Amino acid sequence: MIDTLIHYDKELFFYLNSLGNPTWDGFWLWVTHKFSWIPFYALLLFLVFKKLGWKAGVLTMVVVAGMIATTDQIANFFKFTVERLRPCQDGVFDEAIRFVAPYCGKYGYLSGHASSSMALAVYIGLLLKSHYPKLIFIMLCYAVLVSYSRIYVGVHYPLDIISGMAMGAIVGFVYYNIQRFFQTRFKLVSAA
């Protein structure tokens, strides 16, 4: 059963990875780079401070830092426990994949990019849903873009991505509830 799942996972990776072409490489490298999204994160932070007030804004910054640290640690735990080689590290596939990333770590299950982007998407989407009901869809598109970019550049299999996104969604929901608890307990939301 596991062997069959891994076989289909690799086949799907080869198909999705082969869709790339040099014209789009720069775009997907930009999407996958963690610093490319800083203006987007700044806009989200602005919206949080604008709609929830400065106390809840500061709490949000603290909660997001904890949430990203959590997703990173969980991803690293899985990577070094499962020890599944990334596509770009599996020498058997060197000729079959398009590897366009500037770097390739050793282990890939599960994707830290997918987990942290999905955690942020769920967390911010839920946090601001009463002010911006459609923001959750923008956030989910952001998470899917970042996650797919990892397949495009050749560093993750789809199962790494799907597992990372599922874990990230759970972590984002948990941290959203932590935020709600503290906002309610300490009455941190201003009347905006």
Image (cartoon, rainbow, N blue to C red):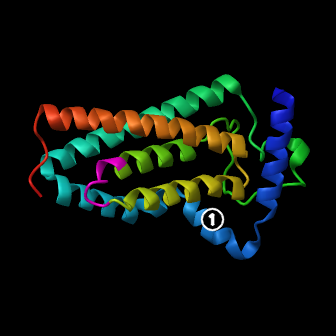
Residue that appears at 63% across and 58% down:
149
Residue 141 lies left or right of residue 181; in this view the side is right
Residue drawn 67% across the image and 40% down it: 160
Identify the residue at image location x=19%, y=58%: 51
Q: Is residue 185 visible?
A: yes
- At label 1, the amino acid type is Trp
| Residue 168 x/y as whole percent | 50, 39
Q: Quadrant of residue 40?
A: bottom left
User: Is residue 190 rendered to the left or right of residue 96?
Assistant: left
From this view, report whether residue 34 is shown above or below residue 74: below
Magenta region? 126-132
Residue 129 is a magenta residue: yes
Q: Residue furthest bottom?
A: 23
| Residue 34 counted in the magenta span | no
Q: Nearer the viewer, residue 112 or 129?
A: 129
Q: Where is 153 relative to 122, above or below?
A: below
Quadrant the N terminus occupies: top right
Mark 1: few, some, or many residues within 10 Å (few <14, many ≥20)? many
Q: Is residue 66 visible?
A: no
Residue position for label 1 = 28
Q: With 127 as the anchor, is 142 left or right in this view?
A: right
> In the picture, residue 166 is in which quadrant?
top right
Q: On the rendered structure, is 61 left or right of 117?
A: left
In the image, 178 versus 24, the foreground residue is 178
Q: Residue visible at 36% across and 58% down?
A: 41
Q: Residue 81's spot in the image, x, y percent?
A: 65, 23
Q: Residue furthest top?
A: 81
Comparing 61 with 34, the one in front is 61
> Which percent across, then down, holds residue 11?
85, 48
